[in-house]
Amino acid sequence: SYDLSQPPSLSVSPGQTATIRCTGDHLGDNFASWFQQRPGQSPVLVIYEDKKRPAGIPERFSGSNSGNTATLTISGTQAMDEADYYCQAWDTTIAVFGGGTKLTVL
Amino acid sequence: QVELQESGPGLVKPSETLSLTCSVAGGSITSSYWSWIRQSPGKGLEWIGYIYHRGSTKYSPSVGGRGTLSLDASKNQFSLRLSSVTAADAAIYYCVRLRNILGATLSHWYFDLWGRGTLVTVSS
């Protein structure tokens, strides 16, 4: 089966840049999506097709994907960005999620 | 604005069948693909499968042959049935819209709208 790996946790100070990486074999040959999940809430799509932002997602969220790594970057991280973040890609016809990264802003 | 709402029993006995329904409001169910994704308590996200109104379905190997997706366009609803449940099936179940890109491979598709989720407990 295809696996996507993420660091379990990441801490940043307010105003700093948070970089969350997601690795998988030849991930750059596919498109990656990223989801934000705040405590007690449903996931929200923040990046799709590697780097596109849905309407309503702040410009501080950006994405890239190359080689074996997809990256979600949050510039000028705010307290409201504290959440779990999941990457997702397709393994042919199967949707695969990373294990999630808990972002703490302190 | 499209909204999704899951419904179904919150408690299912081991070995029985879990049945959930997702109601789509504010848009036609025939315009998109639809998925179920679940999240075990304190765990990550797990895709279960997708369905399209023309009968196309795909399931995750993780549910094996236990999962069945169906769609009722007249009610603007789609459903999940998961048979022979065990404690491992206890989770929050989300219904999700899967945005398909016409003419593009599945790799381009993305989950853009999620329901609030419904918690399913498996216990006798």
Image: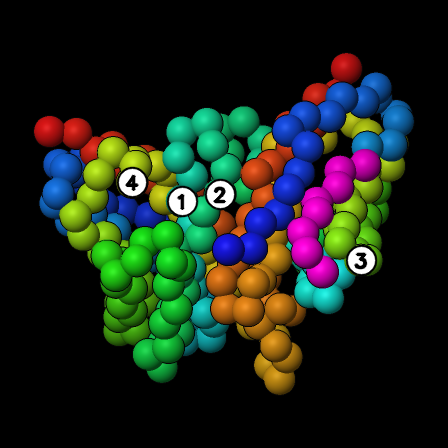
The magenta span reads A19-26
* 1 and 2 marks in contact (CB < 8 Å): yes
* 4 and 1 marks in contact (CB < 8 Å): no
Mark 1 or mark 2, earlier in chain: 1
Residue drawn at x 57%, y 72% is B106
Q: How far apart are marks 4 and 2 (CA)?
A: 13 Å
At label 1, the amino acid type is Arg
Residue A28, percent from left and from top: 75, 61
Return the mark for residue B38: 1
In the figure, residue B108 lies in which quadrant? bottom right
Left or right, residue A78 beside residue A92: right
Same chain for the residues under marks 1 and 2 in the image:
yes
Residue in front for this viewpoint, B110 or B107: B107
At label 4, the amino acid type is Asp
Chain letter belonging to callout 4: B
Residue in front for this viewpoint, A40 or B120: B120
Mark 4 or mark 1, earlier in chain: 1
Q: Distance between the residues labelled 3 and 2?
A: 24 Å
SS of the residue at dot 1? Answer: strand
Residue receiving disc 3: A67
Front disc: 4 or 3: 3
Left or right, residue B92 beside residue A101: left
Chain letter belonging to callout 2: B
At label 2, the amino acid type is Leu
